[in-house]
Image (tube, rainbow, N blue to C red):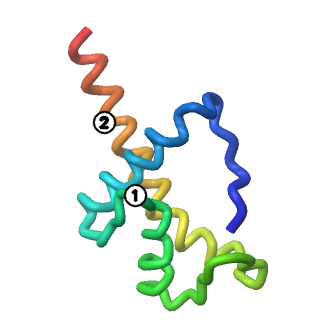
Amino acid sequence: MARRNKILVPEARENLDQLKGQVMKAKGYDVNMTDPNAVKYEIANEQGIPLQKGNNGQLTSEQAGKIGGPIGGNMVKEMVKMAQEQMKQK
């Protein structure tokens, strides 16, 4: 799946990937911290979605959402928690 999301600060990509790995590991997934993006294959396998490395143009948007939704949703929840903690400290 191509990355169409553009982060505002490209230098943050590495930290976002680390956050992804930490969050998904906490959710019980087997995450390779050197390649946290690989967790999407485990999620796809659980959902019965034929995700492969390379071009996955045959996937429907529903299938792609079932893969990316748990990852992105859990990352957003964690970022909100982090922001709330920072606000409490101020």
Image quadrant where one finds the C terminus: top left
Name the spot of residue 46 as percent of width and height, x first. 41, 85
Quadrant of residue 11 within the rendered picture: top right
- Tag 1 secondary structure: loop
Q: CA distance from mark 2 to mark 1?
A: 24 Å
Task: Give the farthest residue toward the front.
Answer: 34
Quadrant of residue 82 within the rendered picture: top left
- What residue sits 49% from the left and 54% below the top? 72
- Tag 2 secondary structure: helix
Name the spot of residue 30 as percent of width and height, x first. 30, 72
Name the spot of residue 84 as percent of width and height, x first. 30, 26
From the viewer's side, name the closer residue of 14 and 80: 14
Among the two numbered marks 2 and 1 on one chain, the one whose residue lies closer to the N terminus: 1
- What residue sits 40% from the left and 58% below the top? 34
Q: Is residue 26 left or right of residue 43?
A: left
Name the spot of residue 59 as percent of width and height, x first. 71, 81
Q: Which residue is mark 2?
A: 81
In the displayed structure, 70 sits above or below 73; it is: below
Q: What amino acid is labelled 1 in the image?
A: Thr
Q: Is residue 46 left or right of residue 44?
A: left
- What residue sits 36% from the left and 55% below the top? 21
Q: Is residue 63 left or right of residue 28?
A: right
Q: What amino acid is labelled 2 in the image?
A: Lys
In the displayed structure, 8 sits above or below 26; it is: above
Task: Give the farthest residue toward the top.
Answer: 90
Tag 1: Cα neighbours inside 10 Å, few (<14), some, or many (≥20)? Answer: few
Task: Give the farthest residue toward the right.
Answer: 57
From the viewer's side, name the closer residue of 34 and 46: 34
* Tag shown at residue 34: 1
Q: Is residue 60 left or right of residue 76?
A: right
